[in-house]
Amino acid sequence: MKTRMNLFAVEKEGYQAMLALEKYLAATELTKIHKELIKIRASQINGCAYCLDMHTKDARKYGETEQRIYTVSAWRDTPFFSKEEQAILALTEEVTLIAGHVSDATYNEAVAVLGEKYTAQVIMNIVVINSWNRIAITTGMMPE
């Protein structure tokens, strides 16, 4: 695939709005690792090579291990992720695959483990990375 357009150049205001959401996310209580796990898992599901490249690099920069990065797609089958991370990854999967809806069990587990405010911030992070995935895939953004 080749790059189709530079969305920032063509629709600067829309791109700036996305950056404003990123600024909001930077000010949330979410840990850097939690943010990157969300971004990696959603990008895996969506097949966004550009975002996977970016967020696996960012995760390493923040201290994430290769082992956990390699197994995030199989998180249910490893002992590597905490109860909080499991709740985050389950919610990430169901929000990303929203046609199947978010189950009460997944939502209630997230709130029970993370609290309502942190869960709300997780949801916002999931929504934003899914938007970036759609921008990157549609415009043909490629890893450098």
Image (tube, rainbow, N blue to C red):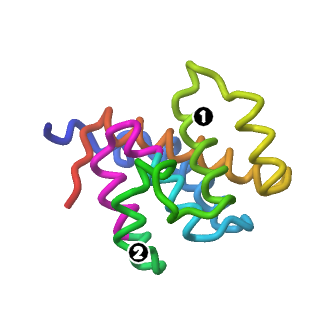
- Write down the region rendered in magenta: 42-57
Residue at (41%, 41%) from the top-left corner?
Answer: 133
Indicate which disc residue 51 carries. Answer: none
Tell me, yes or no, whether the highlighted magenta stretch contains residue 50: yes
**Mark 1 or mark 2: which comes first in sequence?**
2
Gap in angstroms between the C-alphas marked 1 and 2:
25 Å
Q: Nearer the viewer, mark 1 or mark 2?
A: 2
Q: Are marks 1 and 2 in contact (CB under 8 Å)?
A: no
Q: Nearer the viewer, residue 44 or 51?
A: 44
Q: Nearer the viewer, residue 90 or 132?
A: 90
Neighbourhood count class around disc 1 (C-alpha, 10 Å): few under 14, some 14–19, many 20 upward: many
- Horizontally, residue 94 falls left or right of residue 138, namely right
Q: Label 1 is placed on what type of residue? A: Val
The residue beneath circle 1 is 95
The residue beneath circle 2 is 65
For the N terminus, give its image quadrant. Answer: top left
For residue 39, above or below residue 61: above
Q: State the SS at label 1.
A: helix
The quarter holding residue 134 reads top left
